[in-house]
Image: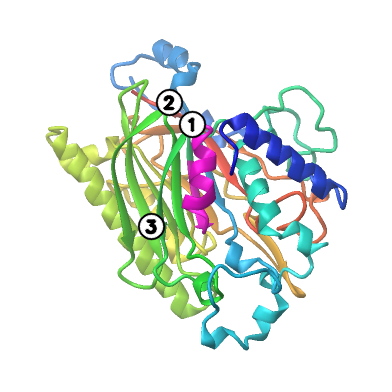
Amino acid sequence: LRGMTTAADVEEKIRQVREDMGQYRPSDLYTRQWRPSPAAETKCKGNVAGINATQEANASDSPSHTISVMQFNALAEGLSSGASEPLPFGRSKEHRKDDTCKAGFGGFTAVPEPEICLDYNNRRWRILETIVGKCYQEHRAIDDDGGSDDDDDGGGGISSCPFDIIGMEEVDRFGGFFAPALALFGYQGIFNAKPRAPGVQLGFYSDGCALFWKEDTFELVDKARRSFRVGTQVYLLATLRHKASGRPIVVAVTHLKASKSKENARIRALQSEELLEVLQEKAANFAENENCSDARSNAHEVPIIVLGDFNAEPDEVAVENFVIGREKGSALSFASAYPANLPYSTWKTRGTNTVKRVIDYIFYKPCCNVDGSPAGFECREFLELPADKNMEEQGLPGFRSPSDHIALAARFFLYI
C-alpha cells in the first residue's frame, strides 16, 4: 500500500493486477446477481416496534435501514503459496521435509498458471476486489441452471457493493494489508489470530478471523476475541450500533475445526454449542441492561448475525445446533440467509480430488419469533452463485475467483 492514500489509488492497483492477469486467461471476477430471498415473502404479524404495515413498507425502502453483509473465507497465504516463494519466517522442523510443502500451492495444482493465479502479490488484490469491486448486479432473469449468467456482463445495474459488515476467515495479512486497505474505503476492523495456525508451521503468518464494518453506518460498542474451549480455533464477537436507527446488533465471526472425521465433527459440535451459549448469554445480558421484564423472552429482540466457515455440511450437528433451536422454540434461534438447496460454498480440486459442498453460512435471527411477533432482521436478498457453466474447469480458486470458497452475501432490513 506504499504511496496509496485514497480508495481510487487502490481501485487503480486492482485494475492493473486484473489486466496483468488477463494476459494469461480471462480474469474478470464472476458477475453475480442479487436475488430475492424466499424469506422475504414471509411477513411478520402485527406492528414492528410500534410501526404499522404502511410505515414498515415505507421504512423498508430507506437505504439507511438496509444492511448488506458478506461472509468470505479468503484462503490463507500460507495454505496456497508456491514452494519457491520466500517465507516471512522459518519453516518448522517437522515440515522441512514434508512432500506436500515441496509441491506448493496448497495442493491446488489443477489451477492453471498457479505461479500467477496464486501469487499472493496478485491474489490479495483480487480478494480485495471481491469485497469492493464492481461485479454485482441487481436482480434480473436467472438462467436454467440456477446461477447468475455472466456471459453478458455489460448490462445495466453493475456496480460496486458497499457491504456494511464483512466477516472473513483465513486472513493472515490483517494489519499489513487488509485493515489499512479497507480503511481507505471507510471500514474499521478487528482480528483474532489462531494460536496454532497451520500456516505458521509452514513459515507464514498466523491466519484468523476478521470483522470489518462501515464507519459511516456503525459504531463499535464492544468486542471480544476468544478461543474455543476445545480445539485451537477462534471466534470474534462485536456489538455494533447502527447509527441511523440507534439499534445495536451483535455480530459473530468464526472458523470451526477442519477436516472430515467423527472426532473433528464432535469438536465442531462442541464449538458450535459454545458459540450458541455465548450468544445466548450476550443476548440475555443485553435484554437485562435494557430493563426488559423477561430477559429470556426479550433475547428474541436482540438482532444477531453469525458469519463463518463451519467446515460442516447442513446435516452435521455443528450446523443443526443453530437451526434446531428454531424448531424447538428456543429463545435463540437462527435461519440461513441462503435457500436450503444451495449447491456449494466451496468447490475445490486438490490434486485429483474434487470437493463441492456447503460449509459456509450467514445465520441471522429470523424476522418472526416463535409467537409470530417481529424481531431482528428480515432477509430481503441473497447474492446468487455463479452459474456452473461459467465456472473455471477446476472450480475454485482460479483467475476469476481468488479463494477456494465463494463469497456469500445477504441484504437485511433492520427493524427499529
Instruction: State the residue in front, 318 or 78.
Output: 78
- Name the residue carrying label 1: 186
**Left/right of residue 116 with respect to residue 138 in the rendered view:** right
Indicate whether 359 appears above or below 369.
below
**Left/right of residue 372 with respect to residue 133 in the rendered view:** left
Marks 2/1 in contact by CB < 8 Å: the verdict is yes
Task: Tell me the crowding category of disc 2: few under 14, some 14 to 19, or many 20 or more residues within 10 angstroms, Cα based.
Answer: few
**Left/right of residue 126 with respect to residue 288 in the rendered view:** right
Q: The residue tagged with tag 1: helix, strand or loop?
A: loop
Mark nearer the N terminus (2 vs 1)? 1
Q: Which-is-in-front pick, marks 2 and 1? A: 1
Indicate whether 164 appears above or below 390.
above
Q: Position of residue 57 (x, y in %)?
A: 46, 15
Residue, x 51% and y 78% (percent of image)? Answer: 261
Indicate whether 138 appears above or below 389.
above
- Name the residue carrying label 2: 216
> Is residue 305 shown to the viewer in this render?
yes
Is residue 168 inside the magenta stretch?
Answer: yes
Amino acid on which disc 1 is placed: Gly
Marks 2/3 in contact by CB < 8 Å: the verdict is no
Q: Position of residue 150 (x, y in %)?
A: 80, 38
Instruction: State the residue in front, 23 or 218.
Output: 23
Q: Give the residues drawn in magenta, as a range.
A: 166-185
- Name the residue carrying label 3: 235
Is residue 119 inside the magenta stretch?
Answer: no
Q: Please identify the quarter of the rendering in which residue 396 is found.
A: bottom right
Q: The residue tagged with tag 2: helix, strand or loop?
A: loop
Instruction: State the residue in front, 238 or 294.
Output: 238
Q: Position of residue 61 (x, y in %)?
A: 50, 16
Q: CA distance from mark 2 to mark 3?
A: 25 Å
